Amino acid sequence: MTLNKVKPLTQVLAVFLFSPLSLYAQFTNDTLTTNTSHQGETAIACSPLNENYLIAAWIDDRTPATVHCSFSTDGGGTWAETEVRSGVRSVDPSVAFDRHGWTYFAYMNGSRALSVSRTSDLGSSWDETDDIATAVDKPYIAVDNTGGEFDGRVYVSWYDISSPNGPYSVLFAYSSDVNPAHTFVLSSRPLIEDSGGQLWSMPAVASNATCTSSPTEVPQVVISFADLKTAGRHSQTR
């Protein structure tokens, strides 16, 4: 029987130092906010119009309560912080760009209402904010950037906690208008109901998003969710 020789330490170090993993050490950490309050649960998105345009958002516990995010126009080299909304705080943020110059910021505000804010000038000003649901947790947003019939439509899914003792549900809403999206239609029924496990969801628009019947029907949107009760990962198409 032939035993494999142990590689010399210098050889192991050389493999590590010049491996792709070591490339990550070359990136610097950039400060997105000067506020020193708690920030966490970050979100980031890249514009389909310009790969150098980025938005980053986070849970923000500053006082007085305001919603903030940061934009970059040079691929993350520098960042500019902007105030989105005052009087509430942002929790569980999710962000997305469309192909028409709009940026969307979905978050749960301090009263557990689901809010969607939008800007067309990379955060210099913010358009009307829509509060589209209550008793929500973990909202996530997606935009149809397929170039199809519903290009520009915005989708949001979340974990409904309106019943403290369950059943808990994954719900979603979609915009009935585009450029910008500001009128949201809530789903008529839950995607899934659960009697004990906690559920999270994340929407994504299929590349062949088409409407199969009436003009008001939601096209091919895949929403994945996790069920901690069964330790399962699932997806449904709506």
Image (cartoon, rainbow, N blue to C red):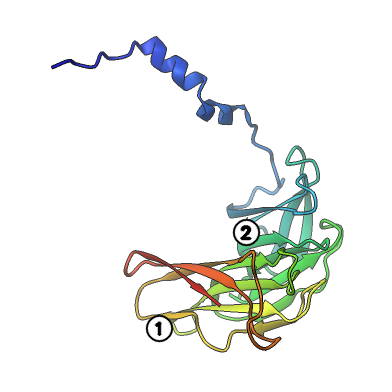
Task: Determine the residue positioned at 75% across, 53% down.
Answer: 47
> Which of the pair 116/144 is nearer the observer?
144
Label 2 belongs to which residue? 61
The image's mark for residue 167 is 1
Where the N terminus falls, by quadrant?
A: top left
Q: Nearer the viewer, mark 1 or mark 2?
A: 1
In the drawing, does residue 107 fall left or right of residue 6?
right
Q: Residues within 10 Å of mark 1 (few under 14, many from 20)?
A: some
| Residue 50 to residue 167: above or below | above
Asked where in the image residue 45 lies, by quadrant, the reply is bottom right
Q: Nearer the viewer, residue 85 or 170?
A: 170
What kind of residue is marked 1?
Pro
Residue 233: give x, y in percent of width and height. Answer: 40, 64
Gap between marks 1 and 2, in whole Å?
30 Å
Residue 214 x %, y %: 67, 89
Nearest to the observer: residue 168 or residue 53: 53
How far from the left and from the top, in percent, is residue 139?
A: 58, 69
- What quarter of the picture does the C terminus occupy? bottom right
